[in-house]
Image: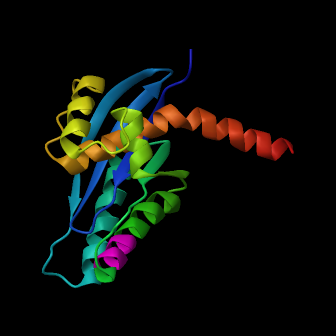
Amino acid sequence: MASAIRILGIDPGLRRTGWGVIVSEGSKLSFVACGCVESEGALPLGRRLRQLHEGLHAVIAAHRPLEVAVEETFVNRDPQSALKLGQARGIALVVPALAGLDVAEYAANLVKKTVVGVGHADKKQVQAMIKVLLPRAETGSADAADALAVAICHAQHRGMKALVAGMRAAE
């Protein structure tokens, strides 16, 4: 039987960064916790990024994941919004890296396809499948559900990533 691995999924956002922790043991998935780290919109950008950093640091300290997965963001809005979201995503990548954790990244369409079966599923479909896959999960928000979906995606694809990395190392 495969050993249990605790995975933290992160759905980056400047206003609200969703997080979700699961345990993957072979094909069995178990819910641990989820929530959101929020930043105060009235604060300067640097202070908001600090709030996200401190919040994610606290999540990692409390739940001790062994692996982390972050959703890649696609923004088709104005450049300012894209830049700010990119900075929040940078926080989502660097906090686990500073804790010594490996960080995997997954495209939003792959996350949705893995969890729902359709790459362009909407947030309600993702939340519905989270309830099916993790019946004990009380997400409370679409951001937390999305973060759990990222963790589930990583649980399903991590073995393939390790296999490919091993093949490359052998070359």
In the image, residue 66 lies at what x, y percent?
A: 50, 42
Give the residue at x 46% y 62%: 93
User: Which residue is outermost to the bottom?
Assistant: 44
In the image, residue 33 lies at what x, y percent?
A: 27, 38
Residue 65, by quadrant, is top left
Residue 75, by quadrant, is bottom left
Residue 87 visible, this angle: yes
In the image, residue 132 lies at what x, y percent?
A: 25, 24
Give the residue at x 40% y 43%: 111
Q: What stretch is highlighted in magenta?
A: 81-87
- In the image, residue 119 sits, relative to residue 15, either above or below, namely above
- In the image, residue 84 sits, relative to residue 89, either above or below, namely below
User: Which residue is outermost to the right?
Assistant: 171
Which quadrant would the C terminus be assigned to in this image? top right
| Residue 133 shown in magenta | no
Residue 20 visible, this angle: no
In the image, residue 1 lies at what x, y percent?
A: 56, 14
User: Which residue is outermost to the top?
Assistant: 1
Give the residue at x 43% y 53%: 70
| Residue 82 shown in magenta | yes
Q: What kind of colouring is applied to the model shown?
A: rainbow
**Nearest the eye: 122 or 85:** 122
**Nearest the eye: 147 or 110:** 110
Image side of residue 120 versus residue 168, left or right: left
Count the numbered circles shown: 0
Image side of residue 82 versus residue 124, left or right: right
- In the image, residue 30 sits, relative to residue 35, either above or below, namely above
- Secondary structure mostly seen in magenta is helix
